[in-house]
Image: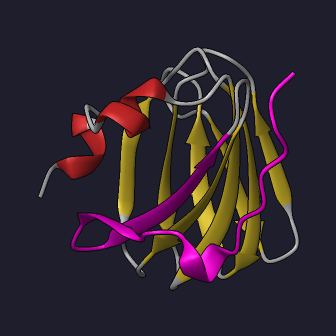
Amino acid sequence: MSQTQFYRWEDMPRERVSDLLERRLITADRMMLTHVYLKKGCVVPRHSHENEQLTYVLEGSLHFWIGDDGEEEVIVGSGEVLVIPSNVPHMAEAMEDTLDVDIFSPPRQDWLDKTDDYLRQK
């Protein structure tokens, strides 16, 4: 069994992924907890991943397009949670400056390896 660990968000390094997106990561064996900071107008391009995802918006709002053609649209605001199943294509745009908590299971290896090129495009 792993050792318990304690973190403070303000002590976690803040990674600048692009001009409009920064994040902090906390990773366990089978889960990843992240703070994602998106500036208004930040677009997360359409992508999918094996990881289940919970997106909990703490401040601001995100407009999501879900599915192969973005046929399902949902706006997730402060205090709301979107569950994205494994391998479901999705994209999002920050409608205002936004802080969201993303939880992934298993952890996003591409985020840990910094091979998430779809987020790093200018």
83 to 25, vertically: above or below: above
Residue plotted at (46% across, 64% down): 23
- Foreground of the two, 23 or 68: 23
User: Who's the residue at 30% across and 73% down the image?
Assistant: 20
Q: Position of residue 33 (x, y in %)?
A: 69, 49
x and y percentages locating residue 70 in the rendered image: 53, 34
Q: Quadrant of residue 8?
A: bottom right
In the image, residue 82 above or below residue 116: below
Please tell me which residue is depicted at 40% across the width and 38% down the height of the picture: 111
Please name the colour scheme applied to the rendered image.
secondary structure
Magenta segment: does it hold 15?
Answer: yes
Pick the quarter of the image with the N terminus: top right
Q: Is residue 48 left or right of residue 8?
A: left
- For residue 27, side relative to residue 13 (left or right): right
Classify residue 56 as left or right of residue 112: right
User: Relative to 54, is 34 above or below?
Assistant: below
Number of numbered discs on residues: 0
Q: Position of residue 11 (x, y in %)?
A: 56, 77
Residues in magenta, as a range: 1-27
Q: Residue at x 49, y 23 (%)?
A: 48
Classify 34 as above or below 114.
below
Reply yes or no: does residue 21 show up in magenta: yes
- Residue 19 appears at what percent x and percent y? 21, 73
Residue located farthest toward the left when viewing the structure as drawn: 122
- The C terminus lies in quadrant: bottom left
